[in-house]
Image: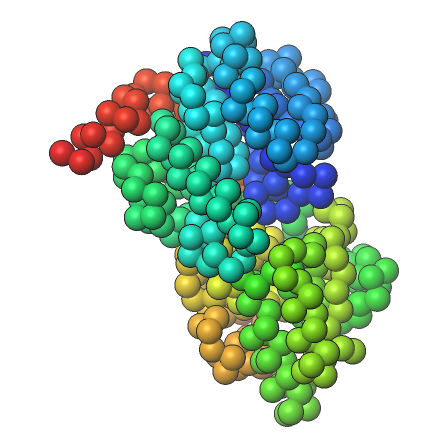
Amino acid sequence: MRIAIDATSVPPNPAGAGVYALELVRAMAKRDRRDGYALFTRTRLLDEATAARKNWLVERVSGGRVRRLLWEQTSLGARLADLGIDILHSTHHTLPLRRTRARRVVTIHDVTFFRIPERYPPLRRLYFQTITRLSARVADAIIVPSNAVRDDVIRTLSAAPGTVHTVYEAAGPQFELMGRDEASSVAAGYGLQAPYILSVGSLEPGKNRARLFQALRELGDDGIHPPLAIVGQKAWRYEEEQALVYKLGLGKQVRYLDYVPAADLPALYNAATMFAFPSLYEGFGLPVIEAMACGVPVLTSNISATAEVAADAAVLVDPLSVGEIREGLRGLLEDSIVRDHYARRGRARAAQFSWRRAADETHAVYERVLLGVPASQARESAAV
């Protein structure tokens, strides 16, 4: 096969979907030397992974988000034809909407813009709702990171079940147990000293930190005041989150670290006492599996993909209940036996996921698409 991977959505400081694209390409480059690949990208983050691979052609696409979209819809199809591409895989929600020579595969990470629309500015929300729905309609296959998203895509986007394939993500190889002294030294560089709670994710309403802050405030009434370190870039309505911290009197207890380089993040996980991630909705929840791989006990939501990914290896709470979040925090903070239990279970759970497996399963989707029936026929069959 000749396969093109569109990773032009990856920003300079990748997180979430950007990390997915990077790790998938790295794993694919390691496993597959038979097929030919064309990689479209705006960054140099994948240069090392592809430099020595003779079967990989890397093309740089310049410009910002709008220019990228124009390139995708006006120029990409012709370039695929020039290269004789059989399969195009777009790693972030969008596809060329015009018919192409290549079969089209798209990864849809979640449908948050339908489920929790307030997480997005109005124009960005409308764009994602529209382009994701249209891309799902023309795709020959849709890859999703969890069964929770699979069900959402089938229900919300009316995708034929036979076209939607779950491929689980994983923690990167850098997320592993570290020596306590080494991890503590890196954490100290960020002004952190154990014990502390870590939370990772962009600063926006869907991460549900308002209830996490309220739970911390209630623990404070009982004399429990653990520091909370938050790693994540500023996003939509971040000011409201920070204002709530001071309104609740947590200004000295909550630390915002902004974006943390990938090289330092494993140490911050390792040095933490526990990891808190009571998100309202996730497509996979990479921070959950990263924390587990680092041997950190995890508290996360009992809904959407986080419950599916964590299984019984984390403290699962109702994200809408401040009381459940508070008691989940209390149990992990006060009982070292409970912490050790979930740390061990978490590491075992994280070991069940790998990017090699994700690459194998993604390649199997390519093969199925190339040898199978077009998505339009699959939808017609499903309707009958």
Q: Quadrant of the C terminus?
A: top left
Instruction: Pinpoint residue 231: horizontal percent, then vertical percent.
Output: 70, 59
Total labels drawn: 0
Which of 67/2 is in front?
67
Q: Residue at x 38, y 29 (%)?
A: 139
Q: Is residue 162 above or below residue 257?
A: above
Quarter of the image for residue 27 reads: top right
Quadrant of the image occupied by residue 255? bottom right
Q: Residue at x 43, y 26 (%)?
A: 97
Give the side of residue 71 with respect to residue 384, left or right.
right
The vertical placement of 246 against 235, above or below, is: below
Give whichever of 370, 98 is nearer the camera. Answer: 98
In this view, the residue in front, 383 or 173, is: 383
Residue 351 appears at what percent x and percent y? Answer: 53, 49
Residue pictured at 42% horizontal, 52% vertical: 114
Residue at the outermost left position = 384
Does the rendering let one see residue 23? Answer: no
Q: Is residue 192 left or right of residue 88?
A: right
Instruction: Describe the colour scheme in one phrase.
Output: rainbow
Residue 369 relative to residue 237: left or right: left
Query: Can residue 138 be seen from the camera position used here?
Result: yes
Residue most extreme to the bottom: 222
Give the quarter of the image for residue 11: top right
The residue drawn where x is 39% and y is 39% is: 133
In the rendered image, the vertical position of residue 47 relative to residue 134, given as above or below:
above
What x and y, as percent, mark residue 347? 56, 56
Give coordinates of residue 124: x percent, y percent.
55, 47
